[in-house]
Image (cartoon, grey):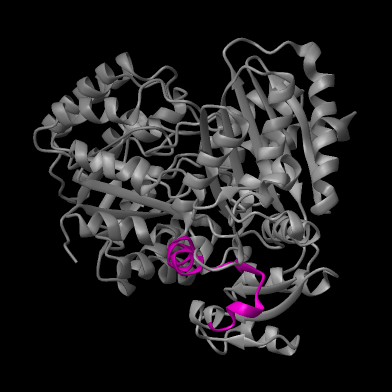
Amino acid sequence: MNVAIIGSGNIGIDLLVKVIKSPLLNCILVAGRRKNSQGMVLAQKKGVKTSDKGIEAVLHHIDEIDIVMDCSSAAAHKIHWDKLKNTAVKIIDLTPSNIGIPIVPSVNLLDALQQQNLSLITCGGQGAIPIGMALQSIIPNIEYIEVLNTIASQSAGKATRDNLDEYLSTTENTTSTLTGIKRSKAILILNPATPCINMKTSIIAITEHDIDESQLTNLEQAVNNIVANVAKYIPGYKVLLVPKIDKNRVMVTIEVTGKGDYLPSYAGNLDVITCAAVNVAEFVSQNRAKVING
Amino acid sequence: MDNKLIILDPSLRDGSHAIGHQLTPEQVSGYVKLVDNAGVNIIEVGHGLGLGASCASVGMSRFSDSVLNDAALNAAINSEICNFVLPGFATIVRNIAPAMDQGINVFRFGTHCTEADLAQKHIEYVVENGGTAMTSLVMSHMTDEQTLLQQAKKFQDYGASSVTLMDSAGAFTLSETRKKISCLVDGLEINIGYHGHNNLGLAVANSIIARESGASILDATARGFGAGAGNTSIEEMIAALHKENMVTSVDLMKLLDASDFAQSHIIQEMPVVTNAGIIGGYYGVCGAFQKHVINASSTYGVPVDKIYQMLADRKAVAGQEDMIIEIAVQLKGELK
């Protein structure tokens, strides 16, 4: 399938490298804003057509495009969606705009066939929601879930920084929607340490009553199972701290190392969302006949 | 730049760390009345990490931001009530806008000392809506004065009224305070402040040096009530400032009544510089981690200093409390 990428920042270019590697996807356009940005130059070097006309360039080539992958910003995606919703393209949104139906491949990939606009939520949401589902499957009465995500400062570009509030609200809303846990809280911390730290997410779940310690083995099993599923499409995704029960709370920490496609391997926060996006795009491509753009 | 010295009391915010964020509206109201009467200019209220920071990893507040704000706003006559805000914990929609609706006009934004741009949108929002946006660079011992200046300039460009260097680990030496404060005073148009912690017993001295170097905002708390080894003691600092002929609007004798109230009604354990405090200050680890480190040390049976050493090696920043358990578990494995 033919893909156009909007945005030539850290996420857009990491995604481009992964799309080029995919046997099912063919990137025909990178549309950004700044002609000579590092990302645009890299795209040209890879032999991909670029434009600094943003969404207008995408609309100009709309008949050749099957999937638009938006790596711009939450505010820009609102505008892009208005211009794309009456076209036939599928949209995979990597901004925290919270417009499309949220997709986490290990949780609800089939939903990707039902709607035109698919939201990849946020890096924290992609990383934490599978763990939330695993915890919920063993201790069903979770009242509160917290997603504390720490990433390297060097991996957070301008759009990520400008979209800090949108990151928090979209992570919270979607974590609640997909896990069914009513109260959720997201926190994002940037750490400038050198050498750069890997992306790390702690998930803390709280229940009304103390959690039975005998559930620990089941919790570990459930977490390991889902981590193995996620690692099929995000290879660097692993458990750093196995479930720890402390009275009425349980905590798990996961770590994501990247493939180093664009930024070095510490930037797992790029891979966690770009790998998920490629997985969704490939799934859409394999199930082309079944796609309903509802 | 205004040369009048402003005294900012964050007892009811930084002190929240020391009592597990269990502050009550009665405590807030009682203390605010007394420090207001003593002539303290600005009073900071809320969770230890500010608006919207009540959470499982750092600690859940017993009362909501809005309940504590109401208590403070109703008790204050002359003092400004201020909310601390760490972007990444609080958002404009969820926290800042409701606080403004409630009557909070002064906010103090904090970012890690190299990440000022994270607060751009929030500062601009407050300024556009007629509020005052003070700012602070957290853990400011972790970078050099030129980087601090460059980051502080961003705050100034966004519309901030001041920048405070937070010595969040109590790690500043006397010469470091002089160098860093002077650099910001010389390079910026807006007011510069200093926020000390007493890990190395230098909090009052550093505050005096900051004033000598041109700072016009000093933070200090009742009896040093605050995270880790405690903050700068406001009674000690005011007495020392006045003896140096550094004028403030605070009445020392009335201030002592406020400190007595804090000691009998709010503070559970008087701040003492323990071994953990010294180690934290020496390695430069965020003071707010202290209680969490001591808990993890006893739960997992690993020494406090080893946890601190590793937190320092990994350059942990404020808010990374989750890392303490991970480190304790790792150390436990290594020690087996």
Q: Which of A282 and B265 is in front in this view?
A: A282
Q: Which of B120 and A137 is in front in this view?
A: A137
Q: In this view, does A23 lie to the left or right of A96?
A: right
Q: Nearer the viewer, residue B142 or B235?
A: B142
- The answer to whether A87 is drawn above or below residue B169 in the figure is below
- The answer to whether A160 is drawn above or below residue B273 in the figure is below
- The answer to whether B151 is drawn above or below residue B238 in the figure is below
Residues shaded magenta: A60-84
Give the overall secondary structure of the magenta segment. helix
Residue A27 placement: quadrant = bottom right
- For the point 65% across and 48% down, the residue is A103
- For the point 45% across and 49% down, the residue is B167
The question of residue A83 being in magenta is answered with: yes
Where residue B66 appears, as percent x and y from the top left, is 28, 30
Q: Residue furthest right?
A: B336
Residue B94 placement: quadrant = top left
State whether residue B149 appears in this view.
yes
Where residue B268 appears, as percent x and y from the top left, is 42, 17
- For the point 76% across and 13% down, the residue is A213
Quadrant for the N terminus of chain A, please: bottom right
- For the point 25% across and 65% down, the residue is B190
Where residue A281 appears, as percent x and y from the top left, is 72, 61
- The answer to whether B121 is drawn above or below residue A57 in the figure is above
Q: Is residue B295 left or right of residue A258?
A: left
Where residue A228 appears, as percent x and y from the top left, is 86, 41
The question of residue B52 being in magenta is answered with: no
